């Protein structure tokens, strides 16, 4: 297919997502504002008001109702989208599981923000990491461009007949959502053609063929089997994600896979990151490479389903790997670290792994922080052992007042 | 609108669901859905209606239905309603005039679901929110034990307070009739199946059984009540082996006659007034090999030419009914609307898989019962060695047949074969060793309370007699499991939330309060609600026999008393105009509604008199302010 170039604009991450939603022109959007997602809800509401889309916009009274209304609309056979952040995602919690259990391909942008308390509106990944077991496909985006590209692909991935699962597209609150970047928008028409028409398997509105959605499936029923079907759909999504990533590459010139490798193949040590920290990491890698250090980056794009096999292939030649987590699970290591370490366990010869927690509550993450991590990795690589498996980057030196 | 018109409407909520006998919510759902002939999409929040009507893979809903969670039915359906509008606008679905209805309990509406409801009302989605208000968080379902009553065998769910039930006299060891003084639903519980040589019963672990205690040589054996958890394999429990003599059954059957509506011609036939040994043998053959097609006015028997059964049947037919028979090589037919109607109404069931022995057969004299079994054996039974076997496609038929045989003394011979000294030796009761006890899963359970003897016979075995949480719809003073009646606190100490008025304050097109006892009023209101150009809300009282603690046949009476005492006034708020739709001729005192309900029992103690007074005052105040709002002097 010939590459169709679109318009190049300077917009924020939120605006890019709103533009993507405008081009997708979903049937129903139900959303409730929360910082830092608010712009998406506002901007999309403006598109509705200006008649740029003919979507039915439900300005619900809470995130719980947002996800509930999305679920009702999806059951009625509509293509549905929403967006939220942080506490909003936490309030939706209950319905996240129901949406995936009932196999509705709802697409949601989650603008990553930390969870209270203390209350703080800035970026970390505690919100989406907490929802990792909810049965949603999770895609992470480094930039506004990626958030835009991912939201368009997410529609196709979730709606694929082999999948039929909800998809959550994540981007960093403020760092990406509120920063103006160069974004290449596709033509409206090519997005419309790319996402195509949604054909639901069943609909509440098919009154001639009434269907019961969400029946009681208690003891002696088939709950376990239904969960297995959901697990299998998640497994099938791997192939679909890669296929849609290639198709999107053919359309836009930007192909997507499970992750992006940056100067990784000839590296000896590397960091694994999600979202915007990848940019800082790549910049630092360039600087340290100039100094002669064999460093690289792996930016994970798909967290659910977790690309275990591919990740092992990409990391097996390394001497040491640092997993950078922008979330914590008090009492254990960061969530991404646990998964990467478990994935590497099956390799005969495997790199040493260390965990760094960084950027909680929007704490700045600078090149000097990532340099710290690389220096620690080079040290580990030289010594051949890990002395401090978990460390924190960018903590303030606090004088304890007693 | 008349009952006749309503009865012609399609039933969209089908039978076979697992709600309790006497459940008010089911009546509410049926009455509301009858109010419109337009297609309806239904959403239920989590609640007893939801869990009991959609047990996967079956469903009682003949309309599209969705359940999402507890607190968000309104929001969920608002999504579906929005999708409906946009998909129509975009031409993605055919033009259809669809209505949307939520059926939520009071918990899912007054409490946890209030926010989503309020949001929907404010956004103006065109949907009808029906609150079936049973005034607490209820859990219940029903069960399948067969109970020996004066009027024959009944399902435990059909037993009503006041019915005479066969019981075991613990002094004389004789069979006695005792009055049932209550039916209680115990919800879904873990149930064990107890098997003896000839009986099996499912019961909860705490259910008492009458167990034989052998006191050793020379001493009299005694009986003790042991719970299922206490009994072991090998214990001997008391079982029923024979019922009283019984008497012929009088049929209340009115023949179709010439001159009846649209009847010009009727084939002559005699229909007996009472049961007889001959008739029972005839019916036995019918249960084995017969069928009835009322619409074709035909009764038929699959009996091949020259078979012994066909000869017997033909003889019996001319003797009892005295009408003509039509036959071919394989079948015998009788063309008579009266015979088809007569047999059809006796309760033997339709179709090979649904045949059963109705309760009244158990009340017949021994000879009639035996002849019935003989007829049955003639058709489908066969002999192996010294015993008869009977094969049927209907499990219910085999189960009822076994009980019939066991109570007709068919097993007496077998006891002699065992040549063992029994704990009881009389013609009614026997003891049997327990062979097996196993967990049968979780099932709905019921219990009966029986006067004096405190026992009854379930599935042929002698057994003894053996949750509800407050919501903001629970009335003042009511007992629930989370507002228990204690030494200090007499039930719920708060008044209920006036949700109907809260909803009316949203200024939506239509709000009404209704009761299933006033069905015409209810259906009219539901009709208005479905036709409203925006959100509509119906708050409908749904008495709950289990939670309110009253017998299952009193649901409509409870609803009516709530209206007549002005506890539950019937009114509507149409575009802001308050109108009383029913004014009781005479306002009854509140105690008339409180008294029959077990949940208010404690209020009738002298020390709680003040709660009743307080409650009455509250009802009076509310009633007066409602009259004022409706501008009635």
Image (tube, coloured by chain):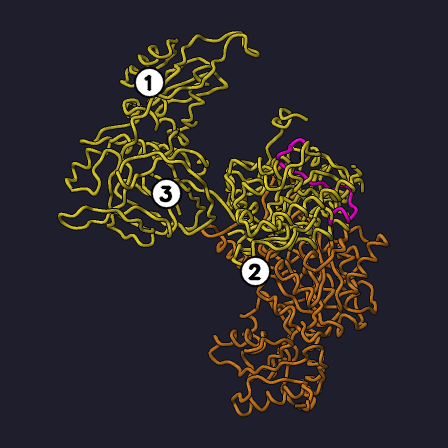
Specify the segment rendered in magenta: B502-523
On the image, numbered disc 1 is attached to which residue?
B276
Tell me, by letter, which chain the rendering colours yellow.
Answer: B
Q: Earlier in the sequence, mark 3 or mark 1?
A: 1
Tell me, by letter, which chain the rendering colours orange.
Answer: A
Residue B238 position, x and y percent, is 27, 42
Residue A228 lies, with reference to residue B375, above or below; the image says below
- In the image, taking residue B411 as reference, residue B130 lies left or right, namely right
Quadrant in the picture for residue A305? bottom right
**Is residue A203 at least partly visible in the picture?**
no
Quadrant in the picture for residue A182? bottom right
Number of labels in the image equals 3
Camera-side residue: B492 or B279?
A: B492
Question: Helix, strand or loop at disc 2?
Answer: helix
Question: Helix, strand or loop at disc 3?
Answer: loop
On the image, numbered disc 3 is attached to which residue?
B454
Task: Using a 10 Å C-alpha cutoff, classify the residue at mark 2 as few (fewer than 14 neighbours), some (14 to 19) or many (20 or more).
Answer: many
Camera-side residue: B628 or A286?
A: B628
Say which mark, if any, is on residue A234. 2
- Determine the chain carrying the residue at label 2: A
Residue A316 lies, with reference to residue B81, above or below; the image says below
Q: Residue at (32%, 34%) from the top-left corner? A: B176
Task: Using a 10 Å C-alpha cutoff, classify the residue at mark 3 as few (fewer than 14 neighbours), some (14 to 19) or many (20 or more).
Answer: many
């Amino acid at each position: 297919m010939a590459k169709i170039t679109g318009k190049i604009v300077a917009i924020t991450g939120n605006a890019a997502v709103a533009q993507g939603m405008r081009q997708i022109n979903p049937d129903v959007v139900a959303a409730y504002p929360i910082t830092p997602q608010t712009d998406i809800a506002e901007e999309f509401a403006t598109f509705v008001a200006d008649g740029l889309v003919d979507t039915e916009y439900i300005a619900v009274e809470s995130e719980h109702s947002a996800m509930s209304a999305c679920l009702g609309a999806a059951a009625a056979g509509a293509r549905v989208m929403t967006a939220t952040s942080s506490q909003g995602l936490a309030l939706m919690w209950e319905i996240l599981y129901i949406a995936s259990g009932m196999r509705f391909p709802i697409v949601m942008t989650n603008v990553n923000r930390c969870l209270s308390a203390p209350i703080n509106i800035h970026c970390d990944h505690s919100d989406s990491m907490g929802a990792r077991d909810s049965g949603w496909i999770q895609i992470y985006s480094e930039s506004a461009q990626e958030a835009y590209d991912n939201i368009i692909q997410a529609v196709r991935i979730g709606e694929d007949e082999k999948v039929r699962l909800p998809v959550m597209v994540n981007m960093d609150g403020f760092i990406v959502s509120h920063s103006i970047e160069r974004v290449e928008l596709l033509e409206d028409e090519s997005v419309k053609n790319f996402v195509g028409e949604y054909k639901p398997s069943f609909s509440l509105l098919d009154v001639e063929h009434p269907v019961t959605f969400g029946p009681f499936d208690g003891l002696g029923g088939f709950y376990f089997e239904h969960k297995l079907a959901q697990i299998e759909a998640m497994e099938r999504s791997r192939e679909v994600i890669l296929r849609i990533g290639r198709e999107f590459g053919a359309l836009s010139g930007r192909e997507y896979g499970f992750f992006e490798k940056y100067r990784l193949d000839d590296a000896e040590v590397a960091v694994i990151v999600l979202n915007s920290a990848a940019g800082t990491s790549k910049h630092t890698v360039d600087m340290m490479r100039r100094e002669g250090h064999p460093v690289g980056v792996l930016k994970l794009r798909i967290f659910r389903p977790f690309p275990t096999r591919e990740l092992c292939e990409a990391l097996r030649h390394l001497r040491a790997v640092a997993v950078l987590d922008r979330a914590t699970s008090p009492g254990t290591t960061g969530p991404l670290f646990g998964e990467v370490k478990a994935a590497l366990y099956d390799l005969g010869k495997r790199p040493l792994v260390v965990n760094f927690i960084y950027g909680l509550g929007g704490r700045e993450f600078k090149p000097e922080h990532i340099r710290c991590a690389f220096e620690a990795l080079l040290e580990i690589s030289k010594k051949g052992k890990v002395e401090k498996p978990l460390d924190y980057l960018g903590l303030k030196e606090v004088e304890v007042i007693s | 609108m008349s009952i006749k018109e309503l009865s012609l409407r399609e039933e969209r909520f089908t039978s076979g669901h697992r709600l309790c006998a006497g459940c008010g919510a089911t009546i509410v759902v049926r009455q509301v859905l009858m109010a419109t002939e337009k297609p309806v999409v239904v959403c239920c929040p989590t609640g007893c209606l939801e869990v009991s009507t959609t047990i996967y893979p079956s469903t009682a809903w003949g309309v599209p239905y969705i359940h999402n969670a507890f607190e968000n039915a309104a929001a969920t359906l608002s999504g579906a309603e929005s999708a409906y509008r946009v998909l129509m606008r975009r031409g993605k679905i055919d033009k259809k005039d669809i209505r949307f209805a939520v059926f939520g309990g009071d918990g899912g509406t007054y409490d946890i679901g209030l926010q989503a409801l309020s949001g929907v009302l404010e956004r103006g989605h065109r949907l009808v929110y029906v609150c079936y208000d049973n005034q607490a968080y209820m859990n219940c379902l029903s069960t399948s034990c067969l109970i020996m009553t004066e009027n024959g065998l009944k399902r435990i769910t059909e037993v009503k307070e006041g019915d005479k039930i066969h019981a075991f006299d613990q002094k004389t060891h004789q069979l006695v009739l005792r009055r049932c003084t209550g039916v209680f639903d115990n919800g879904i519980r873990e149930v064990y199946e107890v098997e003896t040589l000839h009986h099996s019963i499912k019961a909860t672990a705490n259910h008492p059984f009458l167990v034989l205690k052998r006191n050793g040589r020379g001493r009299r054996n005694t009986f003790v009540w042991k719970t299922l958890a206490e009994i072991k394999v090998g214990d001997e429990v008391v079982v029923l082996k024979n019922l009283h003599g019984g008497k012929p059954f009088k049929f209340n059957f009115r023949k179709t006659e010439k001159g009846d509506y649209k009847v010009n011609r009727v084939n002559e036939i005699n229909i007996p007034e009472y049961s007889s040994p001959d008739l029972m043998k005839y019916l036995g053959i019918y249960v084995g090999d017969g069928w009835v097609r009322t619409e074709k006015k035909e009764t038929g028997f699959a009996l091949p030419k020259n078979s012994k059964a066909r000869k017997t049947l033909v003889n019996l037919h001319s003797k009892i009914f005295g009408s003509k028979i039509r036959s071919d090589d394989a079948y015998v037919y009788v063309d008579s609307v009266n015979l088809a109607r007569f047999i059809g109404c006796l309760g033997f069931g339709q179709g090979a898989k649904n045949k059963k022995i109705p309760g009244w057969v158990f009340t017949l004299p021994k000879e009639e019962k035996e002849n019935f079994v003989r007829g049955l054996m003639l058709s489908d039974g066969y002999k192996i060695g010294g015993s008869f076997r009977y094969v049927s496609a209907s499990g219910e038929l085999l189960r009822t047949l076994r009980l019939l045989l066991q109570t007709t003394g068919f097993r007496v011979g077998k006891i002699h074969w065992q040549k063992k000294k029994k704990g009881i030796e009389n013609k009614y009761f026997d003891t049997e060793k327990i062979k097996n006890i196993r967990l049968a899963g979780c099932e709905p359970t019921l219990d009966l309370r029986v006067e004096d003897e405190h026992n009854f016979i379930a599935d042929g075995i002698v057994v003894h007699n053996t949750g509800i949480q407050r919501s903001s719809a629970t009335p003042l003073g009511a007992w629930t499991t989370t507002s228990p009646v204690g030494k200090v606190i007499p039930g719920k100490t708060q008044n209920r939330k006036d949700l109907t008025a809260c909803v009316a304050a949203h200024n939506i097109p239509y709000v009404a309060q209704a009761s299933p006892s006033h069905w015409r009023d209810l259906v009219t209101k539901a009709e208005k609600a479905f036709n409203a150009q925006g959100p509509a809300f119906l708050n409908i009282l749904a008495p709950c026999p289990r939670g309110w603690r009253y017998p299952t046949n009193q649901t409509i009476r409870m609803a009516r008393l709530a209206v007549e005492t002005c506890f539950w006034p019937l009114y509507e708020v149409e575009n802001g105009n308050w109108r009383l739709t029913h004014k009781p001729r005479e306002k009854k005192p509140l105690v008339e509604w409180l008294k029959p309900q077990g949940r208010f029992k404690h209020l009738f103690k002298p020390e709680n008199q003040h709660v009743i007074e307080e409650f009455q005052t509250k009802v009076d105040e509310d009633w007066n302010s409602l009259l004022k709002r409706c501008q009635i002097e």
